[in-house]
Image: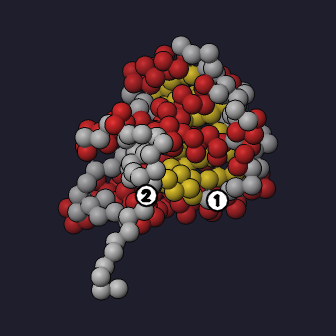
């Protein structure tokens, strides 16, 4: 791997890393030589992920139970990272959640829950980890939005609204924290063949060819590629940007036009 794309020697926090995209990012970073702290609301799940990663020859992986909507838990997560590895170089705000319902059927509690995880959780993690970065020479933050936050999403208005806010927060923080040498960028994936998508849509990653251009669903490792790029020196001239990864565009043709 070219040196500018490497994250070797960095310390990264990856939230929502018990499976799917978060797990793939953590494994990729560790394989390249980064030390990684991973979190999930269930300790057992991240314990299993860390055990798999630590079987390899790369960086060390430490699993910590953390609900990103709980400020005290987030502070404990970052403090543990600093104590274990001496600092925080990269934060990947991957934790998220959603459910499908039309707008009028979403209860206040349902709305708050999804906004709390996707937006407020990003706020907690970014503010706490960002403090360490700003006071210690800088760092990189990779937020996760979604094409839903860029284009809207029927039956997922709560999720789309929260992810749109993450895109805007990314731009704002990139400006505010630039003098502190903190870069803030964002990834907006389309459909990705995660365990969750497989259970809902029946599409397995084993059925997809990474080299096939003609597809509208991606692979976890393709998103991990982008996360590594945004966390490395290769993206040193990028901040405040959202990279959309969604495959072949959906273009409707009409004989009336």
On the image, the x and y values in percent for residue 248 come to 43, 58
- Label 2's element? loop
Q: Is residue 224 visible?
A: yes
In the image as oriented, which residue stretches furthest toward the left? Answer: 105
**Res 108 quadrant in image:** bottom left
On the image, the x and y values in percent for residue 51 come to 48, 16
Residue at image coords 79%, 42%: 137
Give the class, few, some or many, for how many residues have Cα within 10 Å of label 1's Cα (few <14, many ≥20): some
On the image, the x and y values in percent for residue 14 come to 54, 36
77 lies left or right of 150: right
Number of residue marks: 2
Compared to residue 105, the image places residue 56 above or below, namely above
Give the class, few, some or many, for how many residues have Cα within 10 Å of label 2's Cα (few <14, many ≥20): few
In the image as oriented, which residue stretches furthest toward the top? Answer: 55
Q: Quadrant of the C terminus?
A: bottom left
Q: Which residue is mark 2?
A: 248
Give the distance between the C-alpha atoms of the residues marked 2 and 1, in whole angstroms: 24 Å
Which label's residue is closer to the chain start, 2 or 1?
1
104 lies left or right of 179: left
Residue at image coords 46%, 40%: 210
158 lies left or right of 222: left
Which mark is drawn over residue 39? none
Which mark is drawn over residue 240? 1
Colour mapping used in the image: secondary structure
In the image as oriented, which residue stretches furthest toward the bottom? Answer: 256
Compared to residue 164, the image places residue 47 above or below, namely above
**Res 102 quadrant in image:** bottom left
191 lies left or right of 14: left
């Amino acid at each position: 791997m070219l040196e500018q794309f490497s994250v070797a020697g960095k310390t990264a926090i990856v939230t929502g890393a018990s499976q799917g995209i978060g797990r793939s990012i953590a494994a990729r970073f560790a394989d390249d030589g980064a030390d990684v702290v991973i979190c999930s609301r269930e300790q057992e799940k991240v314990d299993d992920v860390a055990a798999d990663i630590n079987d390899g020859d790369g960086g060390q992986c430490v699993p910590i139970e953390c609900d990103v909507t709980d400020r005290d838990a987030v502070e404990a997560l970052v403090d543990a990272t600093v104590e274990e590895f001496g600092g925080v170089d990269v934060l990947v705000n991957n934790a998220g959640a959603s459910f499908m319902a039309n707008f009028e059927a979403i209860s206040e509690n349902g709305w708050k829950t999804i906004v709390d995880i996707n937006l407020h959780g990003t706020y907690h993690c970014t503010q706490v980890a960002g403090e360490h970065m700003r006071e210690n020479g800088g760092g990189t933050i990779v937020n996760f939005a979604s094409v839903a936050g860029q284009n809207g999403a029927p039956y997922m208005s709560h999720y789309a609204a929260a992810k749109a806010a993450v895109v805007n927060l990314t731009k704002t923080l990139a400006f505010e924290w630039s003098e502190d040498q903190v870069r803030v960028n964002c990834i907006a994936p389309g459909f990705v063949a995660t365990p969750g998508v497989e259970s809902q849509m029946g599409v397995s990653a084993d059925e997809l060819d990474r080299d096939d251009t003609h597809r509208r669903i991606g692979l976890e490792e393709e998103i991990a590629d982008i996360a590594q790029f945004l966390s490395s020196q290769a993206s040193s001239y990028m901040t405040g940007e959202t990279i959309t990864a969604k495959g072949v565009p959906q273009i409707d043709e009409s004989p009336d036009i």
